Image (cartoon, coloured by chain):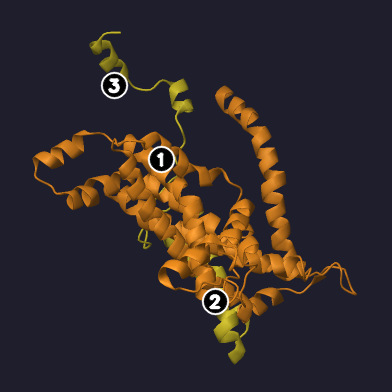
Amino acid sequence: MQSNKLGWILLAPTLVILFFFGVLPFLYVVFVSFHQWNPFAASPEMIFNGAENFRRIVFDEAFLNSLSVTVAFVVFAVLSELIIGYLLAQAFMKEFPGKSIFRTIHTLPLIMAPIIVGSVWKLMTTPSIGIIPHYLDEWFGITMNIGTSAPAAFMTIVIMDIWHWTPLVTLTLIAALVSLPRDPFEQAQIDGANKAQTFWHITLPMITPALVATVFIRLMDALRTVDEVWMLTGGGPGSSTRFLGVHIFKEVFPKTNYGYGSTISVIVLYLTIVACWLLYVSMLAPRKNRKG
Amino acid sequence: MTKQNATQLDTAPLTEEENQRKPTTTQERQGFLPIETNAFDRCFISVVIWVAMSLFWFRFIEPMGASIWISNFIALAIAVHIVRKG
C-alpha cells in the first residue's frame, strides 16, 4: 500500500500536466466540434448545432479529396521508408570503409526542422533556379514544374518525406537488429535456411515490436504533416497536395472556422487511432494469442 | 548466494507483502471477437463502431429519410453485445 501511494505521488506531476495540456484541450476540441463558431464573423458567439458539422463533413468534397490524398501519401511514404530504412539498417550492420561518416551524413536530415526541409526542397525544385529541374532537363529531357504538375508535386513531397524520415526508421531498426540473439540465426544456418527464409521466419517476427512502434510514429506523423507541405507547395497545384493537416490549417486560420476545423481534427484523430489500433491488432495480437 | 539457495528463493511462495507488490493485470478473455480483450478494449471497439456507423449513416442512409437515432440505438445494442459477450 505504501509503495502504491509513493507511485501515485511520483506520477502526480506528470498526470496533472498531461491533464491540463493533453486531456483538457482534447475535450475542448470535441466540445467545439459540436458548435458553429467563427469568432471573427458578424455573430462571433459559439452556437451549438448538434452533429451538423459531422453531417457536413461526410459530403464535403474538399475534405474527402484531402483524405484520399493523405491516405495515398501515407501509404507511399511510410512503406518506402520502412523498406529503405530496413535495407540501410542491414547495410549498417556490416563493416565497410567510411561507415561512420556515411551514418552521420545519413542521420543529418533528422535534425532539421520540417519548415527548413520544406524551404530547402522548394529551392531545389523551383524551375529555373532549382538543381533538380535543371539536371532532369539536362540529362533526361524531363520538364519538372511542381507549381503546375500535380503528380510532380505529390511525388516531390513523398520523396522529401522519405529523405527526411528514413533515418529515424533506420536508427530504430539498427537498435532492434543489434539486440537480436545470435543463436536462432546460427541454428537456421545449420538447418540450411536461405536468406529469405531467415528473414521471414526469424528476423521479421523478432523485430516486429520495433517495427510496429516505428510504423506508429511514422503513421501519426505522416497523417498530420503540415509545415513541409505548406512550405513546398502550399497544398497546390489546385488541391493535389492539400493533405488533411493543410486542409485543417486553411479551414481554421484563413477562414477562422473554428467549429468545423475542430470537427475535421476530431475525425483525423479518430482515423489515426483506428489505423494504429488495427495495425497493432493485426501485427501483435496473433503473436500474443500464439504465446497464450 | 549459491545456486541451490537461488532456486529455493525462486520457487518459494510469495509473502503477503510480495503479493501486494505484484503488478495487477487486466482481466482479458476470449469472446466472439477474434482477439482477447479486456473491458477497456471492448468499450473502445464499441465507440469506434458507433462513430463509424454514425458517419456511414449520415452519408448514405439519412438522405433516404431514416433518423440518426436509429443508428444510435443499433450502435448501443451492438455496444452492449460487445461489452457482454465480446
| Residue A171 placement, left or right of A115 | left
Secondary element at tag 1: helix
Secondary element at tag 2: loop
Q: Circle 2 is placed at which residue position?
A: A149
Quarter residue A101 falls in: top left
Confirm or deny contact between disc 3 and disc 2 (CB under 8 A).
no
Label 2 vs label 1: CA separation?
34 Å
Q: Residues within 10 Å of mark 3 (few under 14, many from 20)?
A: few
The chain under label 2 reads A
Q: Earlier in the sequence, mark 2 or mark 1?
A: 1
Q: Residues within 10 Å of mark 2 (few under 14, many from 20)?
A: some
Q: Nearer the viewer, residue A92 or B51?
A: A92
Q: Nearer the viewer, residue A272 or A120?
A: A120
* Disc assigned to residue A102: 1
What's the residue at 31%, 16% (across, down)?
B9
Residue B15 seen in the figure: yes
Chain letter for the part of the structure drawn in orange: A
Secondary element at tag 3: helix
The chain under label 3 reads B
